[in-house]
Amino acid sequence: QVQLVESGGGLVQAGGSLRLSCAASGRSYTMGWFRQAPGKEREFVAAISWSGGNTYYADSVKGRFTISRDRAKNTVYLQMNSLKPEDTAVYYCAASIATMTPSELKEYDYWGQGTQVTVSS
């Protein structure tokens, strides 16, 4: 069983930055960040391979968000810069035992509880 604990959410003004963290128990997996805004489906944000050598981003966050991982700490980070009001959502960390399509929600086996990110205009 893998446990994922997110932290780092909060309220920020448009143009600001936040860094989300996801501490994982157990072995390393492909890790992803997803988000869900009120009334919308959960969507892919970013993912990183178990080695950290490959990263993937949704078009909406490319150039603004950066995913990284510290394998020694078994922690994944999502650095979010130039935040926009449309980035407001609950952000979820997820772990996939094995996937060839890291942007697909159904590929993930374990989920965190989520952390709220609110961007004011």
Image (spheres, helix red, strand yellow):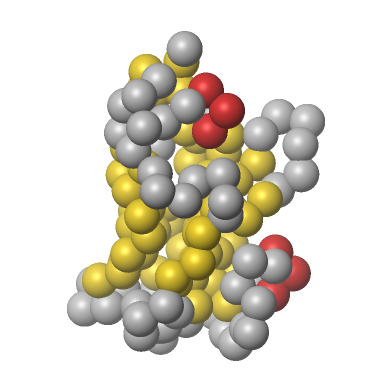
Left/right placement of residue 114 relative to residue 68 reads right
Residue 8 visible to an observer of this rendering? no
Quarter of the image with the N terminus is bottom right
Q: Is residue 82 above or below residue 30?
A: above
Count of numbered tags = 0
Q: Position of residue 19 (x, y in %)?
A: 31, 44
Q: Residue furthest left?
A: 72
Give the residue displayed 58% in from the left and 77% down from the top: 96
Residue 33: horizontal and vertical position, in percent?
A: 52, 57
Residue 45 in picture, x, y percent from top left: 55, 53
Q: Nearer the viewer, residue 74 or 48?
A: 48
Q: Quadrant of residue 98?
A: bottom right
Q: Classify residue 107 as left or right of residue 112.
A: right
66 left or right of 33 in image: left
Q: Residue at x 35, y 24 (%)?
A: 15
107 left or right of 55? right
Position above or below: 74 against 13: below
The answer to whether residue 97 is seen in the rendering is yes
Q: Is residue 46 above or below residue 65?
A: below
- 75 or 83: nearer the eye? 83
Reply above or below: 23 against 86. below
Name which quarter of the figure residue 44 lies in: bottom right
Q: Residue at x 27, y 78 (%)?
A: 71
User: Residue drawn at (34%, 38%), measured in percent from left and top?
Assistant: 81
- x, y (%) of residue 21? 34, 53
